[in-house]
Image (tube, rainbow, N blue to C red):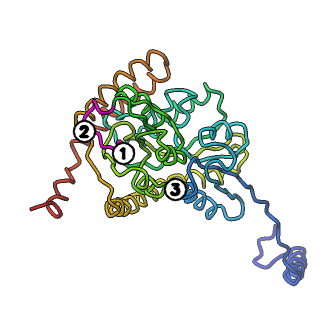
Amino acid sequence: MTTDSKPAPQRRRFLRSGAAAGVGAMAAPMIAVAQSTVSFRFQSTWPAKDIFHEYAQDFAKKVNDMAGNRLKIEVLPAGAVVPAFQLLDAVNKGTLDGGHGVVAYHYGKNSALALWGSGPGYGMDPNMLLSWHYYGDGEKLLQEIYKATNMDVVSFLYGPMPTQPFGWFKKPVANLEQMKGIKFRTVGLAVDIYTEQGAAVNPLPGGEIVAALDRGLIDAAEFNNASSDRVLGFPDVAKNCMLQSFHQSTEQFEILFNKAKYNALAPDLKKIIDYAVEAASADMSWKAIDRNSKDYIELKKAGINFFKTPDAILRNQLDVWDKVCTKKSAENPLFKKVLDSQKAFAQRAGAWQNDYLVDFRMAYNHYFGRK
């Protein structure tokens, strides 16, 4: 190699020939390299008109936008391929590439799955339960349960849901005695709670509830929130909604992937999915506040009567929950394992939150309460 600042003769010839080649290359037309698109077919467990299906589409759009033409997720509504409660099996078998629902819908596979949403969560709110899932033992335990039930799926939890109403009633309930014999719809471990409170429970999918109420197959039902309840038609078949409950006060959504399909993705596409889940979780929380509050006002305008669930019923829910958990823990070691993990996390995180958070109701009443 020469130390001269000028190129050596041989090197000059190389540069000249390379430059000429470069000019020719630039003069030639560019040839586009075709890039194949990976298409995933998803199904939600929600009717197309429900805001929950909209949340599923929001997640898919975030993935599609970030992935460009490399990955495309199409989301179908409940029943398009399989019934809502068969989503997990369909994703496991590869009938669907993925889906959007809630873990409690898989209650029949293992009762411990309903602990991601059902019950009071030892005083945690839904965002705290998500914190337990990702920074405590939750994610690891969920994977353990899916492995034990031979479900080859990849699960992402996101989207903390606001506390769900106690239920919609044709006649409001003033005390626990009036719950006796009511034909009621709920799902997951909430089935056990309402059953212990005297109701005859029918675990229907979301899209079947209003029709069952209209036909008198059930007397009352809970689903989730003002926006879903309004668009699904609850106000057309019941005029009384009882707010506040511990039956599902910690729930969140689940995004499922068939494990083989997910594992075949390029590493950067997996990261896009990961970050899309986090972005969709925040977006869903903000959208829920906006839409639920608007629809709550519209329901009131439509003549719906809202009642606070009596404290006696709420306290009974806690007592009943303890009874259910004792029974399920004795039957299912994984159930107890999840509960113990939640309890340890909740005791620490709950003490911090309860001590640090101000009572926002005090400020609200200062500005908007009756003088």
Which residue corresponds to the image point at 47% horizontal and 34% vertical from the top-left? 138
Foreground residue, 181 or 110? Answer: 181
Which residues are the magenta region?
166-179
Which residue corresponds to the image point at 77% horizontal and 75% vertical from the top-left? 4
Q: Quadrant of residue 30?
A: bottom right
Alpha-carbon neighbours of circle 1 within 10 Å: few (<14), some, or many (≥20)?
Answer: some
Q: Quadrant of residue 60?
A: bottom right
Alpha-carbon neighbours of circle 3 within 10 Å: few (<14), some, or many (≥20)?
Answer: some
Looking at the picture, how far across and down is residue 77, in whole percent? 62, 53
> Quarter holding the C terminus?
bottom left
Q: Amino acid at mark 3?
A: Asp
Distance between the Cα atoms at labels 2 and 3? 30 Å
- Asked if one can make out residue 12 in the rendered structure from this viewpoint, the answer is no
Q: Which residue is mark 3?
A: 50
Observer-side mark, 2 or 3, equals 2
- Asked if one can make out residue 165 in the rendered structure from this viewpoint, the answer is yes
| Mark positioned earlier in the residue sequence (2 or 3) | 3
Alpha-carbon neighbours of circle 2 within 10 Å: few (<14), some, or many (≥20)?
Answer: some
Q: Amino acid at mark 1?
A: Lys
Looking at the picture, how far across and down is residue 144, in whole percent? 56, 28
- Regarding mark 3 in the picture, which secondary structure is present there? loop
Image height of 11 relative to 113, above or below: below
- Regarding mark 1 in the picture, which secondary structure is present there? loop
Q: Which residue is mark 1?
A: 170
Foreground residue, 126 or 118? Answer: 118
Looking at the picture, how far across and down is residue 352, in whole percent? 26, 40
343 relative position to 56: left or right: left
Foreground residue, 329 or 135? Answer: 329
Q: Which residue is mark 2?
A: 174
Verify whether residue 339 appears in magenta: no
